[in-house]
Amino acid sequence: MKISFFKYIFILFVLGILVFAIYKLYFQEEAVENSVEEVVTEEVTQIKDLRLGISNFDTMNPLLSNNKEVLNIDKLIFEPLLTLKENYQTELCLATECSKTSPTCYIIKIDNNRKWQDGSSFIAKDIQFTIDRLKEGKSVYSYNVEKVTSVEILDSSTVKINLSEEVPFFEYNLTFPILPNNYYLGEDFATSSKIPIGTGMFQISAMDASTITLTKNEKWWKKNQVNSKIETIQVKLYAEIGELYNSFKLGNIDIFTTSNTNLEQYIGTIGYAKTEFKAREFDYLAFNCQDSILQNKEVRKAISYAIDKANIISSIYNNQVYLAEFPLDYGNYLYQENTKQNYNIEEAKKILTDAGWVYQYNRWQKTENYKTLKLNLTISVDSSNETRLAVAENIKTQLEQIGIKVTINKLSHANYQRALENKNYQILLTGVYNSYSPDVTFFFGNNNLENYKNEEMNQILEEVKTISEETLLKQKYQRIVEIYAEEQPFISLYRKKQTIVKSQNLTGEIVGNNYFSYYHIENWYRI
């Protein structure tokens, strides 16, 4: 009996250990599952604020700020009469109608039910007030209204804008932000300490020396159309751009826009994502088409084929700029990328040979009217611009490899400006900031830098002023590009790039262009 009793005790003891082990294992697994579940839940939780960064802050007033990134962010707060889409096509914003009634007159209609962020109604007087402030010449937008002679208020929702002369695609000039007249009554606009208000998706709710807080505008006229996932935007202010970069590396900023081509030196290469887009800075070679040699389009085309732009971009710019094919190739909807002048040495030689040029004594020459012309060219460049000077030397080397002798005319900045004004050059290495407008009169119209004349081109430039139908407009611009390729009055070289940098915690479709970096911000969120 004793043996049997101890046997039962032993069996019970073993069963107890098994039960305890199963119990322990079960609850440990459940604890692990709960722990994992909590981590996963934390990862997908949407944080409804956004953190932006600005260096060298001046003012949030969009008519007074000279800070490019402030003006970028300001588009979330203040709205224009017309805005621009991602492809630079105009779109009605505060204006409900924009009609060109004559070459120098526009009628603008608005909706008085749209509210300022203080609850007051948007009225025609606000448009007049804003243009009057811009006419004072203290704003980056002052150029937009340079040709405006008067603004007539026809009623509370209608204004007439009169111009001193016709401005092609003047609608693009109406993209400046509108500010309220009554809000600044009795105030000196330039020195007012009031927090500016707009009509946009967000409004300024607080400001201090380090942070500007934006909150969703509950009175926004589009609130039923778009429900933003972002409820608050914290705009962090930094004295220098280096401080902004460091703050981004520390995880204190979600997104910023920069033109810095050496970004990796400051923030490294991991832990973030980039979206690049073509910037407005456009460099090109302008030919003097009245020059005895360059008046021949065959010579201009041969030079175009003989220049390897990719070589310039890699050797001078370390591939930190975009190859350019045309002034509108920054993303404008009217440019179709199907006409290119690719680098081709043999084609360059063939064009010269077919045009009667003969390669002798290591130089191209041609006899016309008993006179021998030699293919000797001079490229003028601003010597204070070291990068352009290096580009000119690169082009010289490339052209001399096929027997075209090149001299670099290194001008002081003052002499370069005089050469521009007097058009005193054979070839000029220069650059411009492209406007948002698709108007290319600067490059092909009267008084262009190339002294270029083409009757068909002039006719098209006149026609597009009155065409509003998109398909026809695209056809006309396609012909402009074709004439450019045939005539080559200048050579498009490259354009700079802009970069939107975002942390990996920021989710959403990040799309930007020169006009705006925050398209689709209503669908962004941070996790």
Image: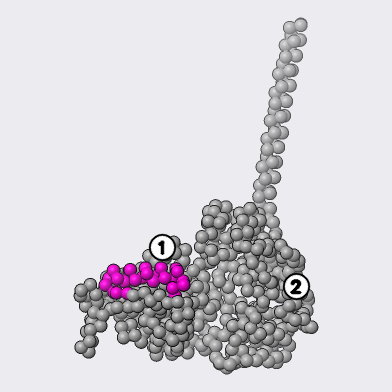
- Residue 383 horizontal side relative to residue 211, left or right: left
Q: Predominant secondary structure in magenta? A: helix
Residue 226, located in which quarter of the rendered image?
bottom right
Of residues 443 and 383, which is closer to you in this image? Answer: 383
Residue at left offset 72%, top offset 90% = 155
| Quarter that holds the C terminus | bottom right
Question: Closest to the observer: 397 or 174?
Answer: 397
Report whether 501 appears left or right of 187: left
- At x 65%, y 91%, the residue is 150
- Residue 430, numbered label: none
The part of the chain drawn in magenta is 382-406
Question: Percent from the top left, x then y, of residue 434?
Answer: 51, 77
Name the secondary structure under disc 2: loop
x and y, in percent, of residue 198 in the image: 71, 75
Residue designated by label 2: 195
User: Which image quadrant is residue 4 in?
Assistant: top right
- The amino acid at mark 1 is Ser
Q: Are there few (<14), some (14-19), or many (20+) residues within 10 Å of tag 1?
A: few
Q: Earlier in the sequence, mark 1 or mark 2?
A: 2
Element carrying mark 1: helix
Residue named by callout 1: 314
Q: Which amino acid does label 2 sit on?
A: Ile
Q: Position of residue 172 (x, y in %)?
A: 57, 81
Rendered-image quadrant of the N terminus: top right
Tell me which residue sits at (36%, 81%) in the image: 426
